[in-house]
Image (cartoon, grey):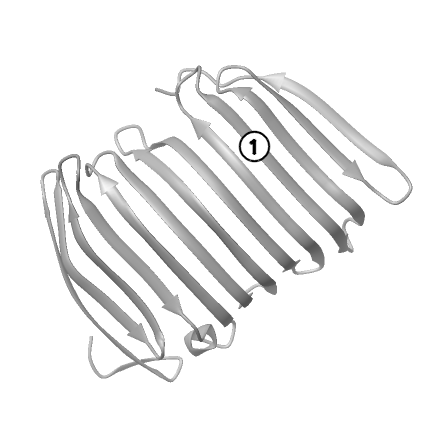
Amino acid sequence: IHDSQLAGQPLSGEGQAQLRAETLILPKLLLNAGSNRVSAQGKLAGNDARITFSVDAPALEQLGSGFSGAMQVNGEVRGKVQQPRLTAEWKGNKLRMPGNISLVETQGKADISINRTTGLISNATVNATAQGLNLAAQKIAKLSMQAQFAMQANAPAAINVRADGIDGTQLRAENFTLNVSGTTAQHALTAALVEREQNWKFNASGGVKDLT
């Protein structure tokens, strides 16, 4: 890409990729939009393949009027083409996106394996936090999530979500918590909503089977 523009900012890039049977070769991929940069390179094949990628976007407002803030992502993809494993870490500050969505700060990391034959996530571990989250007319002062999941019936399943300082036209509450514990085939769910004048609690149990 040469002599192009995006939202009035210079847009340039170069790259090439080769996909042969179970092998993906990515010698180099580079995209620049103003001072924002996306890059990737590597090879995905066999059991010890690796593609690294990064997003360094210190000026998202250069992408258009609906964006602002800074975002940085670093990660890699390992494994076979049919069973890739994605790991990534990210950090964002003063983000604003179309749809009147914004947040003051976010960071986290994820480790996700995908079975492309079934189209399902084989297993996943995610840890993420966000502060100052605005979703149109709804605000959340602090949001955190930790999740662990795998398709195997006896694999541990754990999800912990907490939102503090919920304020808006649809809901006002001090906090909301959601906890799932057990295994994929058999787990318990507990949810609680603490409002200023009343508390709500919900408990359930169940399981997911025949995912493999």
Tell me, yes or no, if residue 97 can be seen here. no
- In the image, what residue occupies the spot 30% across and 39% down? 85
Seen in the image, is 197 located left or right of residue 115? Answer: right
- In the image, what residue occupies the spot 91% across and 41% down? 197
Furthest residue in direction right, as rendered: 197
Tell me, yes or no, if residue 79 can be seen here. yes
Residue 7's spot in the image, x, y percent?
40, 80
- Picture quarter containing residue 6? bottom left
Compared to 154, does 139 lie above or below? below
Compared to 162, does 59 lie above or below? below
Q: Quadrant of the C terminus?
A: top left
Residue 68's spot in the image, x, y percent?
51, 73
Seen in the image, is 61 located left or right of residue 41? Answer: right
Number of labelled discs?
1
Pick the residue in front: 199 or 52: 52
Seen in the image, is 13 located left or right of residue 55? Answer: left
User: Mark 1 highlights which residue?
Assistant: 159
Residue 35's spot in the image, x, y percent?
36, 78
Furthest residue in direction left, as rendered: 20
Q: Quadrant of the N terminus?
A: bottom left
- In the image, what residue occupies the spot 20% across and 46% down? 50
> What is the three-letter code of the residue carrying label 1?
Ile
Residue 175's spot in the image, x, y percent?
75, 44
Compared to 60, does 119 lie above or below? above
Compared to 197, does 17 lie above or below? below
Residue neighbourhood size for the residue with mark 1, other residues' Cα within 10 Å, grouped as few (<14), some (14–19), many (≥20): some
**Mark 1 element type:** strand
- In the image, what residue occupies the spot 71% across and 59% down? 137
